[in-house]
Image (cartoon, helix red, strand yellow):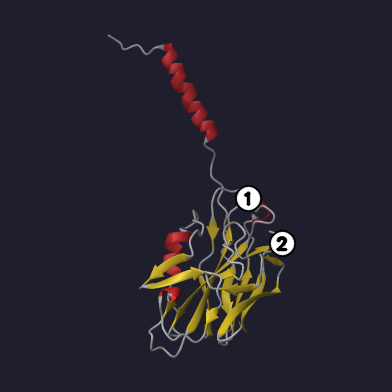
Amino acid sequence: MKRRIPILFTASVFFIVLILLVSCGIATIFMFGNGTIFDDIESNGDKVGLTLTVDNALGNLSDIDSGTGPSLMLFYTVTDSPDAPNFRTAFSTSYKRRYDGVQITSDEVLTVNDITLYRFSNILQTTFQSPTYIATANSPTSPDFVCTLTKTDGSGSTISMDLVFDTGSYTIHDSPKLYRYNGQAFETDIKEVDESFEDYHIDDQSSDMFLHIYGAVNVSKGSFNNIYWTDLVHLGYITL
């Protein structure tokens, strides 16, 4: 005896499948072209720099919502060695993740070999977050830049970092003076490393301190379905 499937049931299944097919479009993925150059430029202990030249062979820069990107984010850690901690692989695994990236939501960004990478803040204790982060291109279709961060002396034994875009048209949000994650200046003379210096990975007896600076560019709002990050780049170090 043949099994009979009720017409009403069959029709219901058909319309459910149809609705699912209509609602499930093909994802649009944003990325820079393979010829993009994102790298550090010469540093000297008092200044570091970064350059971005985007390959727009894919022709998708106009898909970015105006005022939302590409956006620059900067990070740091302090150690007693001039050798740079390698956060690149961990950043790719945790945040870049091929093309389905994740936004930065914590001051403590990554920890590798007991050394933690922090996001910069400023004297206003601004929480730099998506989609604008620290600085945003004024036109999505003109994202190229060269920027520098220069050590500037503060009161007593403190410094801040001054961000300047030497080329390119970018808006720096709130203030170009960058400070520690908690809005405090970087101390250059520490007698004792306590919990107020959790971003300083140094021994109490260390005489040398190095502020290692890293950068990455983010795109996350527009006519596409993903969050895009470049690789994380080490710009160099500032001698404290």
Q: CA distance from mark 1 to mark 2?
A: 15 Å
Where's residue 237, x and y in %?
A: 52, 82
Q: Which residue is mark 2?
A: 138
Question: Which residue is disc 1 drawn over?
Answer: 222
Q: Of residues 182 and 116, which is closer to you in this image?
A: 182
State whether residue 52 is above or below residue 191. Answer: above
Q: Residue furthest bottom?
A: 207
**Vertically, is 23 above or below 162?**
above
Task: Please identify the quarter of the rendering in which residue 204 is found.
Answer: bottom left
Residue closest to the eye, 205 or 10: 205
The number of numbered badges drawn on the structure is: 2
Residue 200 relative to residue 140: left or right: left
Residue 224 on image: x %, y %? 59, 48
Q: Quadrant of the N terminus?
A: top left
Q: In terms of secondary structure, where does tag 1 sit?
A: loop
Question: Few, some or many C-alpha atoms within 10 Å of disc 2 (few <14, some 14-19, many ≥20)?
Answer: some
User: Of callouts 1 and 2, which one flags the residue occurring earlier in the amino acid sequence?
Assistant: 2
Q: Are marks 1 and 2 in contact (CB under 8 Å)?
A: no
Q: Position of residue 166 (x, y in %)?
A: 70, 76
